């Protein structure tokens, strides 16, 4: 048995949740927030048999795409303002960060 932990942008969460449940994966959805852009994320926990991990990964890959987004940088507080760039910067966001962990025991009560 494996535990698949997936962190995605909120924009992709409903689409991914629907795709996973359509393929009979049991999913726990948690709200989370990212550190870099301080934007909303969703973390999914999926418990599944070893043979179904590849199917779960394919569903995640198909439903979570990275995209470019303009981000307004935060002005430095007490730092050197000489190198501060006051205009928006384009960064790549989205996609999915996935961890696959072995599960030693699983109990359902």
Image: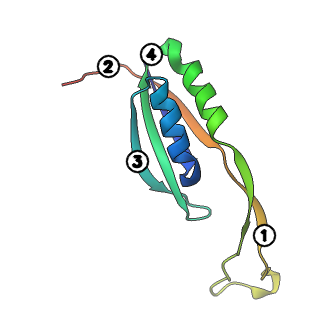
Residue identified by numbered label 4 = 49
Q: Name the one closer to the observer, 22 or 46.
A: 22
4 or 2: tag closer to the N-terminus: 4
Q: Secondary structure at mark 1?
A: strand
3 or 2: tag closer to the N-terminus: 3
Q: Secondary structure at mark 4?
A: loop
Looking at the rendered image, the disc whose residue lies closer to the viewer, 1 or 2, is: 1
Q: Is residue 6 left or right of residue 76?
A: left
3 or 1: tag closer to the N-terminus: 3
Q: Is residue 22 left or right of residue 88?
A: left
Q: Secondary structure at mark 3?
A: strand
Residue identified by numbered label 3 = 30
Mark 4 closeness class: few <14, some 14–19, many ≥20 residues within 10 Å: few
Q: Is residue 102 left or right of residue 10?
A: left
Give the number of the disc on residue 89: 1
Confirm or deny contact between disc 4 and disc 2 (CB under 8 A).
Answer: no
**Residue 23, horizontal then vertical, whole percent:** 49, 23
The quadrant holding residue 102 is: top left
Q: Secondary structure at mark 2?
A: loop
Q: CA distance from mark 1 to mark 2?
A: 46 Å
Q: Is residue 43 above or below residue 76?
A: above
Q: CA distance from mark 3 to mark 1?
A: 29 Å
């Amino acid at each position: 048995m494996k535990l698949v932990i997936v962190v995605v942008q909120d924009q992709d969460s409903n689409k991914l949740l629907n795709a996973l449940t359509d393929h009979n994966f049991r999913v726990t959805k948690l709200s989370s927030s990212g550190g870099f852009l301080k934007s909303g994320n969703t973390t999914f926990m999926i418990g599944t048999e070893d043979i179904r991990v590849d199917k779960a990964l394919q569903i995640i890959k198909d439903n979570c795409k990275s995209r470019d987004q303009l981000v307004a940088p935060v002005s430095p507080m007490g730092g050197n303002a000489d190198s501060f760039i006051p205009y928006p910067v384009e960064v790549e966001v989205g996609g999915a960060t996935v961890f696959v962990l072995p599960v030693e025991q699983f109990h359902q009560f």
